[in-house]
Amino acid sequence: MGDDRTVHLKDYAPYPFLLHDVFLTFELHPENTRVESRLQFEHSTKDRDSIDLYGEALELVSVSLNGKALAAEEGYVIVKDSKVVGDVLRIKHLPPQTFTLEIVTKISPATNTTCEGLYQSSGNFCTQCEAEGFRRMTFFPDRPDVMSKYTTRIVADKSTNPVLLSNGNLIAQEELGDGKHSATWQDPFPKPSYLFALVAGKLVALEDAFTTCSGKKVDLKIWTTDKNKDKVGWAMESLKRAMKWDEDRWGREYDLNIFNIVVVDDFNMGAMENKSLNVFNSRLVLATPETATDSDYIHIQGVIGHEYFHNWTGNRVTCRDWFQLSLKEGLTVFRDQEFTSDLNSRLVKRIEDVQFLRQNQYPEDAGAMAHPVRPPSYEAIDNFYSCTVYEKGAEIIRMYETLLGKEGFRKGLDLYFERHDGQAVTCDDFYRAMMDANGYDGRNLFLWYQQAGTPTVELSSQYDEDKKTLTVRMEQQLPATADTSEEKQPMLIPVALGLLDSSGKEMALGRMSEDGAEAVDLGGVTTTVIRLMRKQQTFVFEGIPSRPVLSILRGFSAPVKIRSDRTEQDLMLLLSYDSDAYNRWDSAQTLAKEEILKAWRAGAGKAELRAEFIDAFRKVVADKNADKHFISQVLSFPSVSELLEEVGSTDPTAVFAARNAVEKSLAEALEREMLEVFTSNRSSEAYKVDNEGIGRRALMLTALRFLSSLNKPEHNERALKAFKEANNMTEQVGALRCLCKNDNELSRKALEDFYQQWKHDDLVLCQWLRIQAQMETPNNLDKVRRLLDHEAFDLKNPNKIYSLILAFSRTYTNFHAIDGSGYSFITDCILKLDKSNPQVASACTECFTSLRMYDDVRQQLLTAQLQRLAKEENLSGNVSEIVHKCLK
Ligand code: 0A1
Ligand code: ZN
């Protein structure tokens, strides 16, 4: 390995200059775009006579200082700095006070395949600057603590680029000779370069307006290519609801008179919050009942909200450096979770979020790329747009709210905006605002930002019949993680606790004392938040009339694992009666986990289920009063990755098989009930995105999934019928997924019909690719290989790559095939992708990071492929960071 690319938080130093104003001129041309930038600087310390600007993949045309052209070597040099991505342009002999730099560069958007900087998608120009894409257009102090006012002039051919957009307000337009025109945009709010955006091309807009709480009219436009203009209605509705919700819930008003969203097909991530010019991956905007599923609809609403909410949490108050990424992302995910909860079903959303965290973030914490929510170092910042920074970061924010209460949290957030509007700040600043606004001592809460790993809380309880006291003992364990060998400190963990009596009724908590401290009167409440902050603590509750069952971690009050001494009967009681939906669901998860692990230990192809287990689930399935969506969540078992964490280093395909076996045995035992649920929840009503419809479809498809696991002709026919009769994509693709549990005539024919019906729609084709990539039938790799050459696939389109290649890397039977074919296939793909799009390549490399979870043979096979990658010359920084951390 060459130079050490690792960047450390402890090395942060403020930028020694202020950049007040930025004037940019883009003369757009597919292969030959000219970028002229005029930068007005001021020294903020007096000791510098040179300035460093960053650039990547640029052709430098000229540099001038205060109007005088500089000569290479004499006036400037290009140098390398191992900590900086790209090149450093060092300009020498600076005058002492203010100075103006003018830099001209040339770039080629048409051949830029990275989807970073300025590139083309479907023939239109667009930009992606977060985190370090701006430097792909011009040399610049491309770091988030440099905030400036931008004026952007775009010059382009009018026939191919009738629409020209950038941040802020349109201040001038000109017709030029030679069929060219120009538009000049000015953004009055100082911002870092990562929030810059430019879009040009043939686009049409759906227009609407929103009047803010102070009576300001905001013009809203969602721009797409002509063929998609009828698919943006839901996104527009979502935007207006997000704007209203941010005012109502947090008192945050929009600050300009214009808000644009642009839809592009080629985009590495979901969407981007550029100031007043959000750019979205088309899969997170376009929706009609025929082409988008329920989960797409809810996801679109949430991400439209997310990007909009960034205007305050991210743009008005931004990050000082990229180590603070969770400052904006954790907080904004928390905000979008709350938005979705307020608009739809809060209980369903909370369970979905916990499921997502356990399935994706817990493995990250346990794997080779483990990092704290605020990492102390990184090699490639792109690799830290992670579930840890986003989702675990959101859980930290939720813990503030749990500890401070809703009102206290709001006070803290108000103070944060009051103090830091217009600044680039840190997670410590957020913490201080929260504490100061509440006079609260949250010692050890901040450690959540600094320590990786999922804590386990071990909890045991003792009931004293004579004294009527309940003693609860808790101990926190912080696991070792791959990022550090340092000893970990106990953290502040809010554990929300409730008690049920033997008939399932809530009990009042009475008085509580802690390790001999004076008792506090809980005033008859039924849930209390215990602050666990030492390694071990004991809490005593007085006046408890009978032996209670403990409902622990209500609402998932902290991102931890719980080990408790509760019995199976206790869990069944909780599943039936707990007033806390999360705990009902979680009890079922624990019961299912035990049953799957039992089947795994037995190693048989068929799981022998205990009668109590079957009865517990029968009750759930038959419950006519429960929320249907909730029932379907109770019926989805813990993921294989969660199960693997329980048992460690083992054959993942065996765990997967055990999980399937339990599903199948349960389907056998409850076939009649599942059939009843399936039949009674079929409906030909017009599609509507509401809780009732979403719940009905989810439950109907869950029942069909169980029935399909039996692979009986009559159930396969049922799935086929549901597939054919579907009047919406949720049911069509849901039924197709069930059919494709088995590789047979029916599923092959259905896949072909689906393709013929949807071959004109790239987003629906992503579903088609994904279903096939994820088939767990033997030798499916051959099919995936063939699909790489199919006209539906496109190796340049991130969505297609994720749907086929990344989706395959998340399967069991074929990715983990014992002959190593799945691993070497993914490696071939990574090597190819890394040359065109390193971000997408590194996303596909993530499947290696859990290698220590698997058995020795698979660890060896994976290691061999990692070594193959490590040997490759010119591997991108993104992929190389993951490879080397896996091999460590
Ligand atoms: N800030 C965006 C996520 C994002 C990050 C990086 C990107 O390109 C490399 C694109 C988008 C968000 O949180 O939505
Ligand atoms: Zn975000």
Image (cartoon, rainbow, N blue to C red):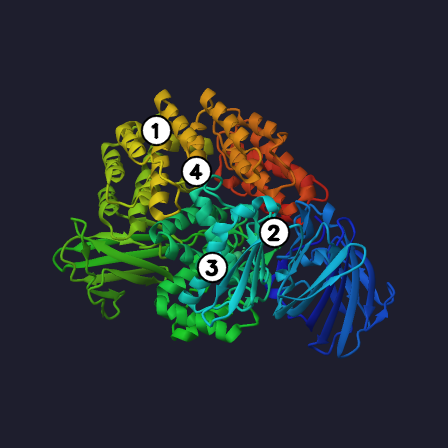
Q: CA distance from mark 3 to mark 4?
A: 25 Å
Q: Which type of secondary structure does the marked residue at label 4 adopt? A: loop
Q: Is residue 373 left or right of residue 122?
A: left
Q: Quadrant of residue 717?
A: top left
Residue on which the image places disc 1: 707
Q: Which residue is mark 4?
A: 728
Circle 1 or circle 2, nearest the eye? 2
> Label for residue 860?
none
Q: Secondary structure at mark 1?
A: helix
**Residue at 26% from the left image edge and 61% from the top image edge:** 539
Amino acid under label 4? Asn
| Residue 775 on image: x %, y % | 49, 30
Looking at the rendered image, the disc whose residue lies closer to the viewer, 4 or 1, is: 4
Outermost residue, left side: 466
Task: Name the side, left or right, on which 613 lies relative to 309.
Answer: left
Q: Amino acid at mark 1?
A: Leu
- Are dots 2 and 3 in contact, CB under 8 Å? no
- Are circles 3 and 4 on residues that touch, CB within 8 Å? no
Q: Nearer the viewer, residue 681 or 85?
A: 681
Residue drawn where x is 63% and y is 51% of the image: 203
Q: Earlier in the sequence, mark 1 or mark 2?
A: 2
Identified by mark 3, the residue type is: Lys
| First along the sequence among labels 4 and 2 | 2
Q: Which mark sits nearer the N-terminus, 4 or 1?
A: 1
Which of the numbered marks, if any, corresponds to residue 204? 2
Task: Left or right? Give the position of 9 relative to 596.
Answer: right
